Structures are given as C-alpha cells and as structure tokens.
Image (cartoon, rainbow, N blue to C red):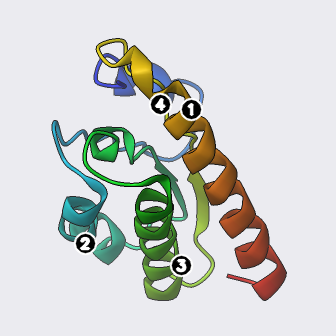
Amino acid sequence: MIKHIEPAKLRQGLKSGVTFRTFAGAKTEDMKYYLQPTLTAKPSHLILHVGTNDLAGKSPEEIAQNISELIKAAAEQVPGLKLLSSEIITRSDREDNDQKVQQVNSLVELIDMLFTIMGI
C-alpha cells in the first residue's frame, strides 16, 4: 500500500533522518517482531500503517486489538515517542471489505482517544 513512497523525498528539508520500512504480507501479529529493531533505535517519531493484511482472516475487533497492542508496546518501550497510526485503507483487490475497514478505523480511533486520555 505504501511501498512506492520514496524515502529520499521524505528526507528533503528535514534536519533528521527518515527511515522507511515495508513488510509485504505482514499481519499485525508479525509486526510485533518486525517493529523491535526500530524501537531499539529509540526513534522520536513513528508512523504505523498496519492492519490491511488482516482483513481477510480477522474480525474488526481482533484487528483493532492487535493495533492497540502495537501502539501500547511501542509507547511503553520508547517513552516520549510521538506515534501515529494511520487508518487502514480498502484494498483494491478486495472491495467487499469497505464496511470492515470502517469498523476497524472507528475502533482504532476510540482506542487512540483512550490512550490519549490515559497519557499513553
């Protein structure tokens, strides 16, 4: 979904580095492991775009729960991390998932609000 983004263009005009990684086919559970090297480097900012690959086999609640666990683990491992979780998007090869995508995004938005209130 984001593999064609060019990191060099993201870095233009910034004083700090930008690292960009994709994990084709990875599901939210896989990202627990793929995220570790990035968190070990103690980034100041992190944008997660996860959940799309889970649409075929998981309920909206399961996907939202997995995303919230990733967010919480990252926040706990890197205090002060400014983290953004993007909404998942409808895959062009699976147009029947529109309602499921909306449900996941609504749940993740609620979780984000709770984390904000809790200071996570």
Helix, strand or loop for disc 4: helix
Helix, strand or loop for disc 3: helix
Residue 78 appears at what percent x and percent y?
A: 48, 81
At label 4, which amino acid type do we have? Answer: Arg
Q: Which residue is identified by label 3?
A: 75
At label 2, which amino acid type do we have? Answer: Gln
**What is the CA distance from the residue labelled 2 to the residue labelled 1?**
31 Å
At label 1, which amino acid type do we have? Answer: Gln
**What is the CA distance from the residue labelled 4 to the residue labelled 2?**
23 Å
Q: Which residue is identified by label 1?
A: 99
At label 3, which amino acid type do we have? Answer: Ala
**What is the CA distance from the residue labelled 2 to the residue labelled 3?**
12 Å
- Report the disc number at residue 11: 4
Residue 50 appears at what percent x and percent y?
A: 39, 47
Crowding around mark 1 (Cα neighbors within 10 Å: few <14, some 14 to 19, many 20+) is few
Judge depth for marks 3 and 1 and give the one in front: 1
- Report the disc number at residue 16: none
Judge depth for marks 4 and 2 and give the one in front: 2
Q: Quadrant of residue 112?
A: bottom right
Helix, strand or loop for disc 1: helix
| Residue at (42% x, 21% y) in the render | 96
Q: Earlier in the sequence, mark 3 or mark 4?
A: 4
- Report the disc number at residue 36: 2
Q: Earlier in the sequence, mark 2 or mark 1?
A: 2
Q: In this rendered view, identify the residue nearer to me: 48 or 57.
A: 57
Q: In this rendered view, identify the residue nearer to me: 62 or 67.
A: 62
Whether label 4 touches label 2, CB < 8 Å = no
Residue 79 appears at what percent x and percent y?
A: 57, 85
| Residue at (41% x, 73% y) in the render | 42
Whether label 2 touches label 1, CB < 8 Å = no
Q: Earlier in the sequence, mark 1 or mark 4?
A: 4
Judge depth for marks 1 and 4 and give the one in front: 1
